[in-house]
Amino acid sequence: MIKTDEVVYLLRRLGLSLEVDDGRLIVTPANLIDDDTRWLIRKHRDAIIAELEDVPRWAWLVRLDGHTIETYHHPESTYAEVMRKYPAALSIVPLPECLWPVDPAKDAVHGMSIREPNPMGTAISRQVARLMEITP
């Protein structure tokens, strides 16, 4: 099952802008939304709205002019706090859990043994997996 942070990341990688206005999810531009994307948005709408709330997180993806960096914060930081640290950022989005770094001390990725197959491999297609790759 694909997680909400991964859905949000995927939608943004497809070129969509996601905003919440008075409890309504606004996704633009409409010309990029096909039937499959529309189904994905409808299926995860409530969770996407909750995900877009400005809650503290420890991992953020910051896109600057010419490159993208991962930033990690302890204690967790909100979008506004990360924006203050990186005022030149073109965009700041939460880093999906599937892209979090490996903890070599625990030999685990998000509580899952590295030796176990990635459950996302069966939940999404290869095409979606390629879209989720980070490219500078």
Image (cartoon, rainbow, N blue to C red):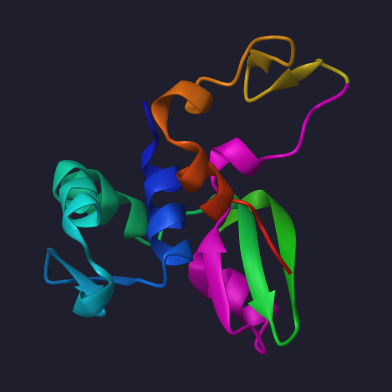
Position above or below: 125 against 130:
above
Residue at image point 50% right, 54% down: 56
- Horizontal side, residue 9 vs residue 75: left or right: left
Q: Quadrant of residue 85?
A: bottom right
Quadrant containing the C terminus in the rendered view: bottom right
User: How far across and how far down the image is residue 73, in percent?
Assistant: 70, 54
User: How far across and how far down the image is residue 40, in percent?
Assistant: 23, 47
Q: How many marks?
A: 0
User: How far across and how far down the image is residue 52, in percent?
Assistant: 34, 59
Residue at image point 48% right, 63% down: 13
Residue stretch rendered in magenta on the structure: 78-104
Position above or below: 129 against 105:
below
- Horizontal side, residue 79 vs residue 18: left or right: right
- Horizontal side, residue 97 vs residue 71: left or right: left
Can I make out residue 24 in this image? yes
Q: Nearer the viewer, residue 12 or 103?
A: 12
Residue at image point 19% right, 76% down: 30
Q: Quadrant of residue 135?
A: bottom right
Position above or below: 70 against 50:
below
Q: Is residue 106 magenta?
A: no
Q: Nearer the viewer, residue 40 or 105?
A: 40
Q: Is residue 96 magenta?
A: yes
Can I make out residue 132 in this image? no
Quadrant containing the N terminus in the rendered view: top left
User: How far across and how far down the image is residue 106, in percent?
Assistant: 81, 15
Position above or below: 85 against 79:
below
Residue at the extreme right of the image, as rendered: 105
Q: Quadrant of residue 101?
A: top right
Q: Nearer the viewer, residue 9 or 48?
A: 9
